[in-house]
Image (cartoon, rainbow, N blue to C red):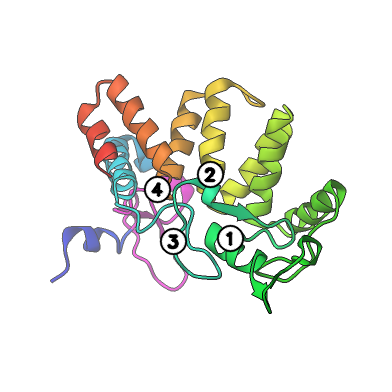
Amino acid sequence: MMSNVESDMLFCASCGIAEVDDVKLKKCACKYVRYCSVKCQKNHRPQHKKECTKRVADLRDKILFKQPERSHHGDCPICMLPFQLDTMKASVTTCCSKKICIGCNYAYCFKKKEGVIVAIEDITCPFCRHPKPSSEEETEKNIMKRVEANNQAALLQMGMHLNKRGEYKSAVKYYKKAAEFGDADAHYNLSAMYKNGEGVEKDDKKKVYHLEEAAIGGHPDARHNLGVYEWNNDYNERAVKHWII
C-alpha cells in the first residue's frame, strides 16, 4: 500500500498536476514533495518552509552523525592497509601524488639486493617507479603537472605549500578545488581559513560547514572541533555525539 509521502510525490505539491510524459516533477530539498516548475515551488514555499527546513536539517544530521567507515587518510595503495592517524607515518610522492605508508616506503627504499643497500640516487617512486626529483624545481614541476590534471592530493599539496608561504588567497583557491573532490583535509584547512580570516573574510557559517564536511569525511580533528563548537553554544547533546564518534 502506498504511503502518504509516496502518494504526494506523484503530484506537484502546489498546483496538483500529475507527472506524465510531458511533465517532469523535481524533488524539493527535503525529498518529501515535488514541483512541476520553479514558480510552483515559490508559491508553495510559505506553507512548506517550516516543514522543509526541519526535514533538511534532519537529513543533514543523519549524514553528519553517521560513523565513518574509516579515517580520511584512506588506505596505502601498495599494502592496502589503513593509514595511521599520525601524519608522520606516511608521505606523499611528488611524481604521482600517491600517499605511501612508512612501511612500504621503508621496504622499497631500503630493500637489499645481494646484501647491498640500494643507493639513494637509484631510488624511484615505490608506486609508479618514476625517478626521484633531483631538485626543488623539478619537484614543483611534477606537482604542477598533477595539479593541472586536477589531482586531489596535488591540489591539497599546493594549497598547503602556498599557505606556509603566507599566500593565503592562492592557498584558498587550491583548497577549494581539492574540497570539490571531497578532500577532508582541504575542508578542514578551509574551516581554519574562514575562522582566522586568512585569504577570505571571517565567516562562522562557512567555518562550521567545512568542519562538518571534513568530519563526514572521517577527519577526527574536525569532529573534535565540532564537538567543542556545539558545547560552547550549549548544544551539549550534539557535542557528546560528536565526541563519541
Front in this rendered view, residue 15 or 90: 90
Separation of residues labelled 2 and 4 (CA atoms): 11 Å
Dividing the picture into quadrants, the one containing residue 224 is top left
Asked if residue 110 lies left or right of residue 244, the reply is right
Q: Start and end of the magenta stretch?
A: 12-41
Please name the residue shown 28% across and 48% down the image: 62
Residue 116, percent across and down?
71, 72
Secondary structure type for disc 3: loop
Secondary structure type for disc 4: helix
The amino acid sitting under disc 1 is Ile
Please name the residue shown 30% across and 52% down the image: 67
Secondary structure type for disc 2: helix
Q: Nearer the viewer, mark 2 or mark 3?
A: 3
Q: Nearer the viewer, mark 1 or mark 2?
A: 1
Magenta span: predominant SS is: loop
Q: Which residue is mark 1?
A: 100
Q: Is residue 134 visible?
A: yes
Residue 214, percent across and down?
46, 43
Asked if residue 170 lies left or right of residue 38, the reply is right
Q: Which residue is mark 3?
A: 82
Separation of residues labelled 2 and 3 (CA atoms): 16 Å
Residue 238, percent across and down?
25, 34
Q: Check the image and report above or below for 231 versus 45.
A: above
Furthest residue in direction front, as rendered:
115
The amino acid sitting under disc 3 is Pro
Separation of residues labelled 1 and 3 (CA atoms): 11 Å
Front in this rendered view, residue 183 or 109: 109
Q: Which residue is mark 4?
A: 216
Asked if the stretch drawn in magenta spans residue 226, the answer is: no
Q: Nearer the viewer, mark 4 or mark 1?
A: 1
Dividing the picture into quadrants, the one containing residue 190 is top right
